[in-house]
Image: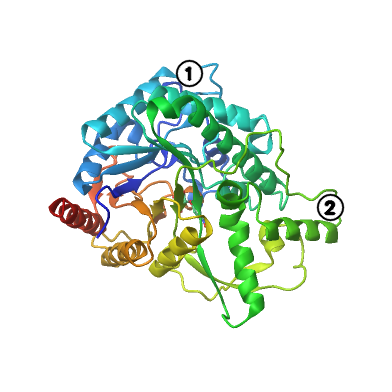
Amino acid sequence: MFPPKFAWGAATAAYQIEGGWDSDGKGPSIWDTFCHKGGGLVYEDHSGDVTCSSYVFWEEDLKCIQQLGLTHYRLSVSWSRLLPDGTTKHVNQKGVRYYNKVIDDLLASNVMPMVTLYHFDLPQALQDQGGWTSPEMADIFDSYACFCFQTFGDRVKLWITLNEPYVCAKLGHEDGIFAPGIKEPGIAAYLVGHNMLRAHARAWHSYHSMYRAKQGGAVSLALNSDWAEPVNPASPDDIAATERYLAFSLGWFAWPVFVTGDYPEVMRSRVELRSKELSCQDCRLPAFSKDEPSILGTADFFALNYYTSRRVKAVGGLPEGCGLKSDQDAEAVVDPTWPVCGVSWLAVVPDGLRKLLKYIKDTFNNPAVYITENGFSQVGPVVMDDVQRCGFYQDIIQEVAKAIQEDGVDVRGYFAWSLLDNFEWADGFRVRFGLFHVDFAQPEKTRTIYRSGREYAGIISKYQSQTNNSQ
Ligand code: PNW
């Protein structure tokens, strides 16, 4: 059983589904630039230029949402579609009109929108001024967030400021495999993470002081985390490495917001130590200023993106080559023999979600939790009759039920990733996460429900009718 007001949702992100990359006055984002560079940064140089054309075919998406019987839909708004140069100096009214229609159509269908302000697509004009490595970004993001609260907040009651700051920092600025493609191991990522936390906090404080009383919504940031267990549960070194692994991923962002207002102690001490060992000028992990609004307490709920679990072991000594990477600071590595399905990084471990939810309850003072993303991908030939994914959704939703009933975790909602097959970042269209198949070869981008989509619709209607009957 699920609580009566449980949110049954699916999620998407603007760059991954909208297309219309330069339509109607939209400014370019860092993903437009990254994809247009070519040279194999993205699988077969795919791009989000057109993708599902949701900018044109929003009403088709709405039909999919209705067909699934969703109570909630998580979408992101494209910053550079609303504010082409990233600042409120110039507002693109056609962008405003588009999202107004999306929001109004959802509400008219009795579907609650959850809106993400930033899902990896920074306006290129802001990247040209240093992007997230610049401390100015906190103020600039705050202005953008206030613009969105002001414009859409009469109808939107669930807000996510930033999606997966970990992925932006690490994949975007350390590994360089996501836009903006910067490879500055161990320095830029910490700086970016820091400015993203400052930006998020600024926006939360603005909502809290200027909009909450009138609009009555809730604001958080979506944090991705794997669940992690030691390779050898009897090894104190592996146990400690597993704790470090979690501290350097989820803890990096969750500790400042939910626990202390600062990074996990083990993260601070390890980065300091290794900075000394590697003769770095300064510690690399920035300090929060006492003169700025606090980071602690700036989330009204816990938003979790969960995909997979890892077995972790300790590594001793400094690895060869560039030793500054944040995962090398953690001195914890993932066991490469852990089985994966679908995309290379996704091992299907449904009970990892239950364990992670319990960990979140115990570590972060029993917050209300929304699972803002969870899903399983298809690679290779299209399988409409995707029984494996039907089993996946059955199993994982069962684990969420157990977390609620047996572990007492306050889970408020579950959002499947994703409503549609879409542009899966560096993997292009090779990897399909949708509950609906999208025919990218057709100009109409025809959406067709997978068997797993029908399965999810069935799960939703089953639980919805149970709660309705018991009321
Ligand atoms: C999330 N990794 O990103 C994003 O929020 C979605 O936009 C994305 O489509 C979804 O997960 C599926 O990948 C991630 O490489 C991207 O570990 C990459 C990783 C994790 C999350």
- Give the residue drawn at x 21%, y 35%: 109
Foreground residue among 336 and 252: 252
Label 2 environment density (alpha carbons within 10 Å; few <14, some 14–19, many ≥20): few
Label 2 CB less than 8 angstroms from ligand 1: no
Q: Is residue 47 above or below residue 28?
A: below
Say which residue label 1 marks.
Answer: 91
**Amino acid at dot 2:** Cys
**Amino acid at dot 1:** Val
Foreground residue among 320 and 351: 351
Q: Seen in the image, is 93 located left or right of residue 226?
A: left
Give residue 329's quadrant in the image: bottom right
Residue at the farthest left position = 469
Foreground residue among 319 and 244: 244
Label 1 CB less than 8 angstroms from ligand 1: no
Q: Position of residue 249 (x, y in %)?
A: 59, 57
* Residue 40 visible, this orientation: no
- Give the residue drawn at x 52%, y 35%: 204
Q: Position of residue 61 (x, y in %)?
A: 27, 39
For mark 2, give the secondary structure: loop
For mark 1, give the secondary structure: loop
Say which residue label 2 marks.
Answer: 280
Marks 1/2: CA distance? 43 Å
- Give the residue drawn at x 62%, y 50%: 260
Q: Is residue 201 above or below residue 253?
A: above
Q: Is residue 112 above or below residue 94?
A: below
Q: Give the colour scheme shown.
A: rainbow
